[in-house]
Structure formats: structure tokens, C-alpha cells
Amino acid sequence: MPLAELLSELQQIEKVAAHDHAPLILGAFARHTPFDGGAIYLRETRDAPLRLAAAHSFEAPAILADDQSLAMARLLVPLRTTRDHLGMLALSGESATDEDVRSASAAATYLATLLANHRLLQETREGDFQLKYRLWELESLYDIGLSIAATLNIDDLADEILFRMISLINARRAALFLRDGAGFRLYRSFGEVRSDFLDEDLAQQLVREGVPLTFEENTDCIFPACMAFVALPIRGNSDVIGVLAAADRETRDGGIGAFEANELRLLSLFASQVAIALENARLHREALEKQAMERELELAATIQRDILPKAIPEVEGIEIATLARPAKQVGGDYHAFFVRDGVLTMLVADVAGKSMPAALLVSALHAATQLLFAEGREIGDIATELNRHIHNWSAENKFVTMVIVSIDRENETLEFVNAGHNPAYIVHHGKDGGKLDQIRSHGLPIGILPSTRYSTQRRPFPPGSSVVLYSDGITEAEDVAGEEFENARLEEILAAGTTPAALRDSIAASVDHFTAGAPQKDDQTLVIARSLA
Amino acid sequence: MNEELRVAVDRRSGGAVLYTKGYINNVGGEEIANRAYELMNDGVRVLLLNLRETKIVNSIGISILIEIIEKMIEQGGKIGFCCLTPVIHKTFQIMGLANYASIFADEETAAKELGLAA
């Protein structure tokens, strides 16, 4: 028997410990020895039973007990080293001599050494892989901390979270739910998810227990038809802000397994990192929104500032004073002057809403007003046209309260239109002080109904009289207790009656004294004109 | 996002390029291995795996990629990877794939270095 050739061929068989290579080993014995039949049993691990790996012309059971004999075997030799019993080789062959049996036994011993070496190499490689894998897990957790903390866009962050989690625990599917009111809404998933909302009972259990929960073969879980899944809460500073879930952990043998202690520990660490990242992203988003709002407010304020008159017109015989104090949250106060044939027209308006929408409506109002006055129309007609224009071209809930007055010194009259605005005042100055006459609203605010018509009203306006227009930012200015300034306080100042500038300063000082540092909630506008005697 | 992996093969003079799209896990890794072994059995000895559209790989997928690399090296061939995400690139380095296979930033460089037709 050419033993050397048999040993050489055995050595050539790569992965000699693998079950699917066992037929090659039997083939080598059949080619180089008189043993034309046989069987090989191998243990997959140290404690595993002897399992049939290959048989050729040999009746062999699938599992062989350690001390079991085989009737057909001429030679039954354990494949063992000093440490391990790796397998069993059974050979049959009627023509084999005792010398052949001795040679085959020697070859079996050599085969056992090859098996042991191969197993050792496999174990070393597996150990090396596991060591690197643990290193990778640690590096991943570290990287996750850096990476997701640096990702402030919540969409990018959601992808990063899912990708990292899936690879970290060898899951097949994963989902991220974020707090939405009392429940949790699906924000991002990898693989199919059953519902857009997390099951209420599961959500309550996660919030209550605050630890990862694992489920096996739960047919009604987050992921349809999953074998096993895990869900764990993402705890923010004060509450559970989201839920991470993953399904179907892959195992090295190609199967699907339950999530084990190591994965749960990793997931818990991971969820802590995710919580910080999500909080960071939320704060970043809020900061961006605040910035955007501030930019919008600034722009709106600029628009309004540019629209308001840069200077008070000089009209012979008329003294004018104004006050325009915008609130921090830009409101919609507007005032304008027009002079035609020695007649001064003044307008004070208050646009519904605040910030940019209000500023845009003020801008539209400004443009339309300028055009209509340039056409030389009388103020009732102008108000009617403005109403039609604003109703047609602005949003449904947008309207403007407005008061327009024209001072005709020659005829000593005051023409006015008050469209839903606060009552303006005419102050007739006499020896006993000022006598007040209110100019009340006589029509709907501009922009409410398209068919509203406004008529021009008239009052006597002898020399020495003043007219006071204002916005509700004056009379509704609040003190720290929420009490309003109200018309009574305004009227008290007006009745004292002085020059427009003195009245303006007195009203402003009185409002400031009344509010005493409470924040200004609305624009404050005052336009006062006096026909000189 | 979907978990299934798709592999497209581009046979070229000098070897082949495998384009993967999706998750390289057990199933995805086996899909790549099947395609790679078919090519090896067909005599291909230079393989480039373009992972541009793969964002996730798990440890099972990595072990399968290692097997493919070993098999190719046993047959005297070589394998390269290109267009990896930073996360996958780092993973390959830690898990030792970078010791046995070349990693390139882009496909053009990879094809040139591996001797594949562009």
C-alpha cells in the first residue's frame, strides 16, 4: 500500500475538517488502500455527537455512539489527539491484510492530526474575528457618539441611527419612532413596518419599564412576520422621546435568532447616544426656527420702516406731530399723509395679524393708497376702492381698520372716513380746556366684504381745533397686571389740550408710565394735527 | 429603505465589477458570494466590488466577504473594493479586510490599479 501517496493526498484536501470534504478523504483511502468502503464521522464541536459526514459502500447510522461498533467495519479507528476526540473512521475491504490495517491506522492517526490542526486554525481565525468584531463594536459606539452628535439634520440623523443600529446588532430590519403627542409615530424604517404608530400597549410598557424589551415569534409585532424583535425607549432629559426597534438578528450559521444579552447591552448604550443626538438636533432646529423668525421680523420691520413717512409734511397753518413705535413682534400699523390743494389728508390704519404677513399687507395697502390719492378721489371713494382691492387680493382672514381725515382750513371743515378703527378725536380748545368730539367708526373694516361702500363724513373744524388719530396699541397698552391704558386716560390728556408735539409727548410718557416696563405687545401710532388760529 | 441586496455584474477585459445595492448581511453576502464564485469558476481572477449604493454591512456579511477574498487569493487572484462609505471603510479596516484586499476611493482608480478595462 503506497502510504506516502495516501498521506500526501490527505494533506492536499483543504478544509479537511469540513463535512462536505469527507467524501474526498474516503476516496483517497479507496484509491491508495484495499479498503474500498467506509464511513467518516465528525464532531462539529467538542461536545457534539459523532455525526456521519460521508459513507461509501458502507451501512452507517447517522449518529455513532463513542463505544458503538459497526458490523461492516474491518477497521474502526478513532480520530483523536491527546486533547480531543474529533471523529471516527470506519473502513471495510475484504482483501485488506493485517499490514494494510496497520498502515491505514497510521494514516488515520495522521488524518486526526490534520483534523486537529485545521480545527485549531479555524478556532484561531474565529477568535481573531471575534476579537476584531468586539473592537469594531467599541469603535462603532465611539464613532456613533461623534457622528450622530455632529449630525444636526434630523433626517440625516435618522438614517445614521438606523444604519448603525442594524449593523451593530446584525438585525435585518429596524425602525425609529419619535414622540408625537401621547404616542410614537414612525419616523424612519429599514424594511417593512406594520403600522405608522407604535402599538399603544407596547409604548406604555416601554415608557413604564424604561429598558429594552425582547419578543420572540410575536406575529403581531412591529415588523410583519418577524421571528424576534427588540424595542427600547430613547430617554430624553425629562421624558421618553422615541423608541428604537429592530427585528430578526442574523446568526453565524445563517439562521435567525433572538436578541441576546450582548446585543441588548449594546443597544442600551446606543440608545443613550441617540437620545443626546436627537436632543441636539431638536435644539438646533429650534435655534434655526428662532433665527428664521428673527430674520423675518427684521425684514418685516424694514418693510414697514421704509413705508412710513420719512418726514412730516409742511402745510401752511397746520401743526403736526407723530409717534410710531413698532412692537418687537412687528404689528401692522401704518400711517400716511397726502397734501392736495392745501388740504392735508392723514391716514392711520391697523392691519390684522403680525410679522411678515402683516408687513406685506401694509405694503399692498400703501401702494394702493398712494395710487388712489394720486387720482384725486375723495376719501369715501378711496376707502371703497381700497376695500375692494384688499378683499380681492389678500388672504381670507386679512382686514384693515382705518381712519382717514382731511383738514380743509379754507372751509374750516374736517372730512373723515372711519372703517372699523378706534374712534379718533377732535379737540376743540376753549377757555375751559379742550372739548372732545369722537369720530366713531361708520363702516366695516376694509377687506371684510367686497360690496361695502364708505361715505365721507364732515364735521366743523375751526382754527385752533386738533384731530387725534391713534392705533389700539395706545389704548390697549397693558401694564404688568394685564390692565389696559384705555380711552379714558387718553381723553384726560387730550382734554388738557396743548400743541400736537406736547400732546404726543404727554401721551407717550403716560403710556410708558402706565405700562411700567411691561413688554409692548402691539405697534403704537399717534398722528395729531392742529389747525392754527 | 429596503433590506434586499441586489448585485449587478459587469464582465470586463481583465476581470469583472460587481455593483451592490442594499444591505450586505447574511442573505446579501451569500448573493455576492454566489456571483463571485460563478465568476471565479468561469476563470475570472480579478474582481472589483463597487459598494457605492451599499450603506450597511453587518458582521455576517463581512465574514462572507472575507471568505470570498480568501477563495480568490487561494486561486491566485485578487479582489478590490471601491466607493465605500466612511463607515464601511473603517469597518473593513478594523475587521482586517483591508489587509487582504485593496480599497480604492473610486472605480476609475480601482480599475486602473487592478488592470480592469475601464
Image (cartoon, rainbow, N blue to C red):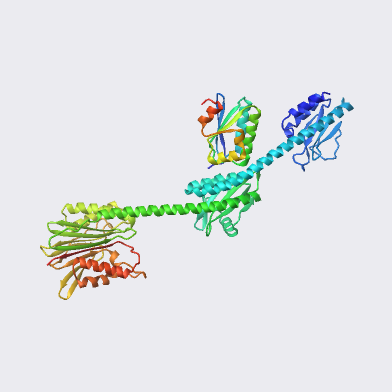
Of A213 and A137, the residue lying toward us: A137
Query: Where is residue A62 drawn, in percent x and y?
Result: 78, 37
Query: Where is residue A77 drawn, in percent x and y?
Result: 84, 34
Q: Is residue A397 left or right of residue B14?
A: left
Residue A527 appears anywhere in the view: yes
Of A279 and A72, the residue lying toward us: A279
Image quarter of residue B70: top right
Q: Is residue A175 above or below residue A2?
A: below
Of A434 and A447, the residue lying toward us: A434
Q: Residue furthest right?
A: A98
Query: Where is residue A492 drawn, in percent x and y?
Result: 24, 73
Location of the C terminus of chain A by quadrant is bottom left
Location of the N terminus of chain A by quadrant is top right
Query: Where is residue A69 drawn, in percent x and y?
Result: 86, 37
Please tell me which residue is depicted at 55% across the width and 51% down the height of the picture: A273
Image quarter of residue B13: top right
